[in-house]
Image (tube, rainbow, N blue to C red):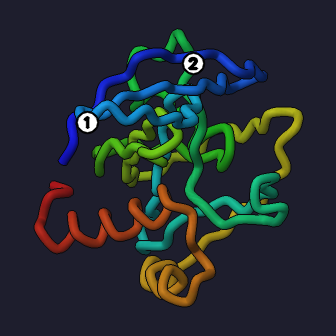
Amino acid sequence: MKETKRLERILKYEAYRVKVYEDVLQQSDGTILHHDYVKNRDGAAVLLVDADENVILVRQYRNVEDKVVLEIPAGVSEPEDPGFDVTALREAEEETGLVPKRMKLIGNILNAAGLFDEHTAVFVGWDLEKGRRHLDPEESIDLVRLPFTKALDMIYSGEIYDGKTVIALLGYQDMKTRGLLG
C-alpha cells in the first residue's frame, strides 16, 4: 500500500449542517490526488425494544432518497451534550415519546469513510417508560412497532436498509446471543 499524506484541505462550500472540502493528497510515489471531504456533526441512535421484544422504529421522509425511510430514532449531538448516551435518550423521547431506563452501546460507526467524518453511536435501549413526544417543527414522523424477528426479516427483504438501523438490529441480535445485555 502506498503511503499517503494530506498536503492541503480547501473549504469549498459551507451549508447549514455541513462543510465541503477538497483534500489535496500526495502518495509516496509523488502522485497527487484530489478527494472530497464532508464535515458533519456526530450523532447517536437507539434501537428501542419493548417488553414483548417489539422494536419501535420511525418512518420519515428523507430528502436524499426522496422517499420515506424506516429507521431507528437518531439525531445529531448538541454542543452541550456531555455524551452520546444523552443524545440517544433525547432523540428517543423526542421522536417516539419513549425513554429507555436501560441502554447499552452497540458500537460507534463511521457512516461513510470515503466521504464523511460523521460518527454515530448506536445503542439498544429497553425497559421503556412513557415520556413526552415533541418533534422538531420540520419533522413528520410515524411510529412503527414490529416484532424484532420481523424487523430482521425486513433487512433481508430490502425494506430496512438504513445503515445505523441494520447495524442496530444485527448488533442487538448478536448481543442477545452472546448474553451481553445483562
Residue sticking out furthest to the front = 30
Q: Residue visible at 47% across and 33% down?
A: 117
Q: Nearer the viewer, residue 3 or 151?
A: 3
- Is disc 2 in contact with disc 1, using a CB cutoff of under 8 Å? no
Q: Secondary structure at mark 1?
A: loop
Residue shown at the point (66%, 66%) measured from the top left:
70
Residue 101: image quadrant is: top left
Neighbour tally class for label 2: few under 14, some 14-19, many 20 plus, Cα within 10 Å: some
Residue 96 visible in the shown view: yes
Name which residue type carries label 1: Asp
In the rendering, at what x and y percent does residue 156 appear?
Answer: 48, 87
Q: Dot 2: what SS?
A: loop
Tell me the quarter of the image containing the C terminus: bottom left
Query: In the depicted view, which residue is nearer to us: 173 or 56?
Result: 173
Q: Residue furthest top?
A: 80
Q: Quadrant of residue 105?
A: top left
In the image, what residue occupies the spot 52% across and 36% down?
A: 35
Depth check: 44 or 28 in front?
A: 28
- Separation (CA) of disc 2 from disc 1: 42 Å
Q: Return the x and y of residue 18 as percentages of the image width and height.
A: 67, 26
Per the rendering, the mark at residue 78 is 2
Mark linked to residue 119: none
Give residue 3's position: percent from left, percent from top: 21, 35
Choose top left, top right, bottom left or bottom right for residue 28.
Answer: top left
Position of 160 compared to 136: left or right?
left
Residue pointed to by mark 1 = 29
44, 141: nearer the viewer:
44
Q: Which comes sooner in the sequence, label 2 or label 1?
A: 1
* Above/below status of 52 relative to 104: below
Up-down: is 148 above or below 19?
below
Q: In the image, what residue type sits under mark 2?
A: Glu
Badge 1, how many Cα within 10 Å: few under 14, some, many 20+?
few
